[in-house]
Amino acid sequence: MSIAPAGRRPIARGVTSRHSNVNTNPHTCDYPGCGEIITRRGDFIRHRQKHSAPRYPCTVHGCSRRGPRAFYRADKLRDHQRKKHRMAI
Protein backbone atom coordinates (compact mmCIF):
# COMPACT_ATOMS: atom_id res chain seq x y z
CA MET A 1 0.00 0.00 0.00
CA SER A 2 1.34 3.41 -0.92
CA ILE A 3 1.17 6.29 1.50
CA ALA A 4 0.14 9.76 0.34
CA PRO A 5 2.48 12.66 1.13
CA ALA A 6 1.70 14.56 4.30
CA GLY A 7 -1.24 16.92 3.88
CA ARG A 8 -2.56 15.23 0.73
CA ARG A 9 -5.24 12.58 0.62
CA PRO A 10 -5.54 9.99 -2.14
CA ILE A 11 -8.36 10.59 -4.59
CA ALA A 12 -10.98 7.85 -4.74
CA ARG A 13 -11.83 7.07 -8.34
CA GLY A 14 -15.38 6.40 -9.49
CA VAL A 15 -16.96 7.87 -6.38
CA THR A 16 -19.78 10.34 -6.98
CA SER A 17 -20.99 12.76 -4.34
CA ARG A 18 -24.58 12.23 -3.26
CA HIS A 19 -25.10 15.93 -4.03
CA SER A 20 -23.78 15.60 -7.55
CA ASN A 21 -25.76 17.05 -10.46
CA VAL A 22 -25.11 13.91 -12.48
CA ASN A 23 -28.36 12.31 -13.59
CA THR A 24 -28.48 8.99 -15.36
CA ASN A 25 -31.97 9.64 -16.75
CA PRO A 26 -31.93 12.76 -18.92
CA HIS A 27 -35.27 14.30 -19.87
CA THR A 28 -36.09 15.01 -23.50
CA CYS A 29 -38.62 17.72 -24.32
CA ASP A 30 -41.45 16.23 -26.35
CA TYR A 31 -42.82 19.56 -27.56
CA PRO A 32 -43.04 19.48 -31.39
CA GLY A 33 -39.86 20.85 -32.92
CA CYS A 34 -37.95 21.18 -29.63
CA GLY A 35 -36.32 17.90 -28.56
CA GLU A 36 -33.97 19.59 -26.08
CA ILE A 37 -32.27 17.19 -23.67
CA ILE A 38 -32.07 18.36 -20.06
CA THR A 39 -30.39 16.37 -17.32
CA ARG A 40 -31.84 17.87 -14.14
CA ARG A 41 -35.55 17.39 -13.46
CA GLY A 42 -36.02 20.91 -12.02
CA ASP A 43 -34.43 22.45 -15.10
CA PHE A 44 -36.69 20.32 -17.30
CA ILE A 45 -39.83 21.50 -15.47
CA ARG A 46 -38.69 25.13 -15.84
CA HIS A 47 -37.92 24.54 -19.55
CA ARG A 48 -41.45 23.29 -20.26
CA GLN A 49 -42.83 26.71 -19.24
CA LYS A 50 -41.32 28.15 -22.41
CA HIS A 51 -43.84 26.21 -24.46
CA SER A 52 -46.89 27.69 -22.72
CA ALA A 53 -48.27 31.23 -22.61
CA PRO A 54 -46.16 33.69 -20.57
CA ARG A 55 -47.73 34.34 -17.17
CA TYR A 56 -45.85 37.37 -15.80
CA PRO A 57 -46.47 40.66 -17.66
CA CYS A 58 -44.67 43.86 -16.70
CA THR A 59 -47.06 46.21 -14.89
CA VAL A 60 -45.14 49.42 -15.65
CA HIS A 61 -47.19 51.77 -17.85
CA GLY A 62 -45.85 51.92 -21.38
CA CYS A 63 -43.66 48.79 -21.13
CA SER A 64 -43.92 46.43 -24.09
CA ARG A 65 -43.28 43.27 -22.05
CA ARG A 66 -46.96 42.24 -21.98
CA GLY A 67 -49.03 39.64 -23.81
CA PRO A 68 -46.81 37.33 -25.85
CA ARG A 69 -43.72 39.32 -24.79
CA ALA A 70 -44.37 38.79 -21.07
CA PHE A 71 -42.10 36.63 -18.90
CA TYR A 72 -42.36 32.91 -18.22
CA ARG A 73 -40.73 33.22 -14.80
CA ALA A 74 -41.42 35.63 -11.92
CA ASP A 75 -37.70 36.01 -11.16
CA LYS A 76 -37.04 37.19 -14.73
CA LEU A 77 -39.84 39.76 -14.42
CA ARG A 78 -38.25 41.06 -11.20
CA ASP A 79 -34.83 41.25 -12.90
CA HIS A 80 -36.40 43.19 -15.79
CA GLN A 81 -38.14 45.65 -13.46
CA ARG A 82 -34.96 46.22 -11.45
CA LYS A 83 -32.74 46.78 -14.49
CA LYS A 84 -35.03 48.40 -17.05
CA HIS A 85 -37.31 50.44 -14.76
CA ARG A 86 -34.92 50.82 -11.80
CA MET A 87 -37.56 49.59 -9.36
CA ALA A 88 -36.47 48.65 -5.84
CA ILE A 89 -38.11 45.26 -5.46
Image (spheres, helix red, strand yellow):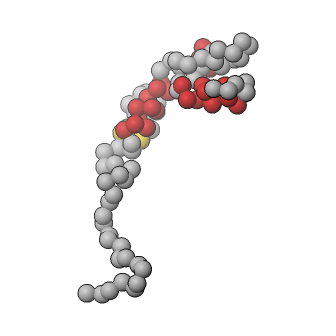
Residue 35 lies, in percent from the top left, at: 43, 36
Report the front residue among 10 and 42: 10
Which x, y percent locates residue 66?
Answer: 63, 15
41 versus 76 height, above or below? below
Residue positioned 41% across, 78% down in the render = 8
**Which x, y percent locates residue 41?**
37, 38
Residue at the (45%, 32%) spot, across then down? 46
The residue positioned 70% from the left and 25% from the top of the image is 87
Judging depth in this view, the residue of 84 and 48 nearest the camera is 84
Residue 39, image quadrant: top left
- As rendered, which of 38 and 87 lies closer to the eye? 87
Q: Give the side of residue 9 with respect to residue 56, left or right.
A: left
Name the quadrant of the C terminus. top right
The residue at the far left in this view is 1
Quadrant holding the N terminus: bottom left
Q: Quadrant of residue 83?
A: top right
